[in-house]
Every structure is written in C-alpha cells, then in structure tokens.
Image (spheres, coloured by chain):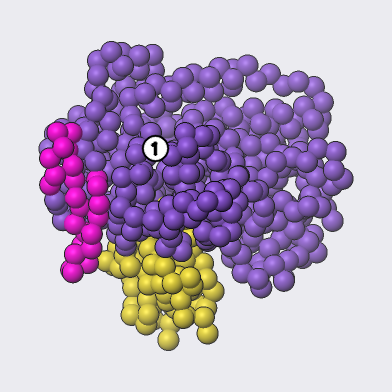
Amino acid sequence: MTGAPHQFFWEHRPVEFEASDSIAAALVRAGIVDFGSRPDGSGARYFCGIGACQACVVSVDGVLVEACLTPAHAGQQVRPARGSVP
Amino acid sequence: MTVRDVIVIGGGPAGVAAAAELGRAGLEVTLCEQGSALGGAIHRQAGDPSRSVPVPSAQSARWRRLQAALAATKAEILTRHAFAGLDGTGAVLIEDRGRGRVISMRAKALVLAVGGLERVMPRPGWHLPGVMTAGGMQLMMKATGRAPAGAVLLAGSGPLLLAVAAQMTVLGNPPVAILERSRQVLSPLRAARLLLRPAYIAEAAGYMARLFRAGVPWRLGATLQALRPTGAGRLEAVIVDAAGVESRVTVDKVALHDGLRSSSDRLPVAAPGRDGQPLVVMAGDCREALGGLAAIADGRKAAHDVIAQLLGGAPDSAADNQVIDGERQAQRTLAGLFDFGSGDLSVLPDDTILCQCEGGTVGDLKRLLASDDRPSPREVKLNGRFGMGACQGRFCVEWAGVLMAQPTGGPQPSAADFAGRRWPMRPLAITSLLDAVADDATLPASSEESD
C-alpha cells in the first residue's frame, strides 16, 4: 500500500502533504496535533520546530525521528512512537 | 581518515557567513545543516515560493547576499546532516539523517553555528497538544506559507510575538490576542532609547500598524495563567490582565515565547593541546543570542579566528565587532522593554509539569529540594530526572535552576551544572552508532549530497 503521490499514512489513515512539507506540518494541517505517545509515555506533539525539544518524535517506517525535521514522502507509515516499533 | 580544514555546523546566517568567509580564504570547508535546505530559522523559505511569508526586505536581501557569497566558494554542503557531537578523540560525529547513520569526520577546526534556543516559561498545560513555541509556529508558517488554522492565542513576552501575529494577519488568520507580560513596552522614556536603532522601530511600527488595522489586541501586562484541555480537543486559556481581572477564552492553538537564549552551555568546548582535537569556535545565536544581523558578523568573525589559526595573519574583524556591539546594545534595550524575567515560578501549582519529556512536576522538584541533604544540580538530574529526558534539559533545567535558587537567594545553577557537556547532542538510534563509519570509508571527499 503506497497510496496517492502526495499521501502518507498516520495510523493507516491517509494524510495529504505538499512538496517539501515536513511530516509535522502535514499532520498539523490535517488537524492532527496530538501525535500520540513518545517512548517514555509522555505526549507527543509539535513544539519547538528545530529538533531541540524531541516532543514531536514519531515512528516513520519503524524508525523514530523528529516529525519537524523529517520530510514527508509518499507512502510513509507514520505512527505514534510508543508501541510502534515493529 | 581525511582531515578537512573546517567543518561548519549549521546552515543559518552565522554558519553560511562563516563557510563563505572560510571558503573565500581558500580553506576546504564542509557545511552541515540538519534541515533539508539552508537558511536557519530566520531565513526559512517556503516550499512553494508563491506562498512565501512577508519578511523585512533588508532581511531577504541579506540572505541573498549570503547565498551568493557561499555559492562563489567550493564549500561542500551536506543537508540533512545533524551534529551529534565531538568525541574524546576529536572526531566530529555527524548524523546523516537520510541514511540513518552516523559519520565520523575529522577537521582542523570546527565552527558551531547551531542557533539559540527559545525560552518558554512553564505554565499549567504548556505540555498539551496544540501548544507550541512562537518560533516553532513561525517556522511552520514560513515553511508552508500558511497561517496556523483555527483560533490562535500568543502569550509571553517579546517582539517575536508581534512579528508572528503580523505574519499570521497577512496570511489571513490574525490571532485572537497577544498577551504581553510587560506593562512598559510603550513607556516613552524607554522607547526613546530604541530610537538608536531605527531599523527596529520601523519593523515594529510596521507590525503594530498591521495588527491595529486588523483589530488584534496587544494586551500589555496580561499573562496566560493556565491552559486546560476542553473535551472537544480545544484549549481553554485562563488569562489575568494587568488589573488582575481573570478571563477565559477557548482556542485551538497557543504559541508561547519568553525570549531567546544561547545554547553555548551545552556545546563542546575546545580541549587545547589534546591530540586530534580540532579548534572549536562558536558563532551566532548559539554563542550569544543577538539575532540574525549579529549572527552574520559573528560568523565572519569566527571564520577570521579560524583563518588566523590555520593560515596565520590577523584578518580584520573591526567592522564585525561593531555590528555585534550594536546588536548587543539593541538586545539590552529590548530586554528592558519586554519582560523576559523568570517571573515568580513559586506561584505555579505543584502539579504543573516542569519536565515535558518525563512529566516531572514542580511539586516533584520541591519535594526533592526539601530533603535535609539539599541536592546538587547533578543530583536533581540523576535522582529527580530533571534534565534527564529526551530534550536533555533544554526546556526545563533553566526553570529547575530558578526554583532551586529562589528560596536560598543563591546563584542559579547553569544547564552545564545539571547536564554537563557530552555527546550525543540528541538521542540517536543505537543502530546508527553501530553502523558509524569514517566518512572517507564510503563517501569520496568530493561527494555532493542533496536531500
């Protein structure tokens, strides 16, 4: 399942993105501000935008990354960091 | 392993100015930027150029000049390459984010231009989804060319709140209000001193005119006391105005900002005389938070220090020093107008989250401090886990330090007192370290990487 050219998946639900969007920008634009839980159980969400706070860590295709620093690509499987690692 | 002349970390104004100046002097330079494009926070460009956010024209002209100066050199530019640390052998560890691995590089000099940090005072509810830093909101706006959707409240203190509000207004969604903690921004006596810096006055006047026309209230002396989640995924904000009157408003997003600070207290410092250790120089807001104009001068100045060490001679930094001194004076004036003071954190309810990473509260810290054997900052980190979480204390140890110093009146511990200076600079996947490679083992030194 790769989906449309400008879609990735947030918990299996398609999210539209624009060229050069970060994953965080696309999620927030889609109305998703709660990024689930981080590995330590605290809440994940966009906060500082520069990778310093680590609050927006999510799992992208099984790898934990900052959503604010990670470009969106078609077909990515994005999930909350907690409980997402295969 | 290949030894480069210089590795510059950070593709904002300081890093680009440094790389351009170093390249012009004939040194071999590698410039690493964690994001997908150069520009840093201040010069972040929209993905779609037709949607760019208006910025002062002098600011865009400065960035065009920097880009041209860099393009005129042979500097190697590695985007999506983040600084992971400087290890004990002097190897510069760089995380290649595209490949998910750490590269080990060597250089005669390392210029750190990683930018400053935004200060956000803790408040009940500041950890909720929908709450972000004003700088974070502005970056998203610059990158997407869109205002954040829904009802937005800006709170804290500083000129950045005005800039964000004005940009939101131009993009079609003015904020509900700006809550500015300072009561005295408009005090004529203090404002007169700002006349020393006409560019700041013009920029602020432009923002304020735009906000006035759009009817955005700039509420001086008003503070955001608390945020609570509503059932419907929105945020209820409790506001106390200058007269002490409480009111409530329900919004979708909140941006907080309490000034900027340097990040030098957690960056590696040079270990002179140790074999293999590069010369380490900091430049721009990470060294001292003076803004984008000073960052360019500071980047050039850092380059001059490196050139003097590696090539000899004494490049003239007089003009750059003058810019830096002027901007330092301007920042001092602004700090007098706005209220970046740490405020009285002792009034925060005990259940206020202090450590956003692990959920440690103000009450948790107070209990730890109340023990007969008063803990050191290091013990507060190790036993209380303040500064231990994924952000490595970037957003809590300043406030933990304030709370530790407040009752005793003693000196406030620094971030380095809590956390020390050690690598990695950010959490790294163990697998990326297991696969760490010497850069010339797999990458030809001349390889060009884009994202």
Which residue occupies the foreground of this view, B4 or B395?
B395
Where is residue B341 shown, x and y percent of the image? 38, 33
* Residue drawn 55% across the image and 17% down it: B322
Is the N terminus of chain B in the top left, top right, bottom left or bottom right quadrant? bottom right
What color is chain B drawn in?
A: purple
How many circles with numbers are drawn on the protein?
Answer: 1
Q: Residue furthest front?
A: B372
Residue B293 drawn at (x, y percent): 49, 29
Tell me if I can see residue B159 in this picture: yes
B294 is within the stretch colored magenta: no
Task: Mark yes or no: residue B418 visible.
Answer: no
Q: Could you tell me which residue is drawn at 79 percent across and 49 percent down?
A: B90
- Name the spot of residue B256 as percent of width and height, x first: 32, 46
Mark 1 lies on residue: B342
Chain containing the residue with disc 1 = B
Residue range highlighted in magenta = B224-247
Snapshot quadrant of residue B162: top left
Q: Nearer the viewer, residue B69 or A10?
A: A10
Q: Quadrant of residue B319?
A: top right
Q: As rendered, which of B39 and B75 lies closer to the eye?
A: B39
Residue under the image location 44 percent in, 44 percent down? B403
| B245 part of magenta stretch | yes
Q: Position of residue A81 (x, y in %)?
A: 46, 74
Q: Quadrant of residue B219?
A: top left
- Crowd rating for badge 1 (residues with CA inside 10 Å; few <14, some 14–19, many 20+): some
Q: Is residue B217 left or right of residue A85?
A: left
Q: Amino acid at mark 1?
A: Ser
- In the rendered view, tell whether residue B34 sits above or below residue B267: below
Q: Which chain is assigned yellow?
A: A
B267 lies above or below B24: below
Residue at image x 67%, y 55%? B423
Drawn side of residue B441 relative to residue B23, left or right:
right
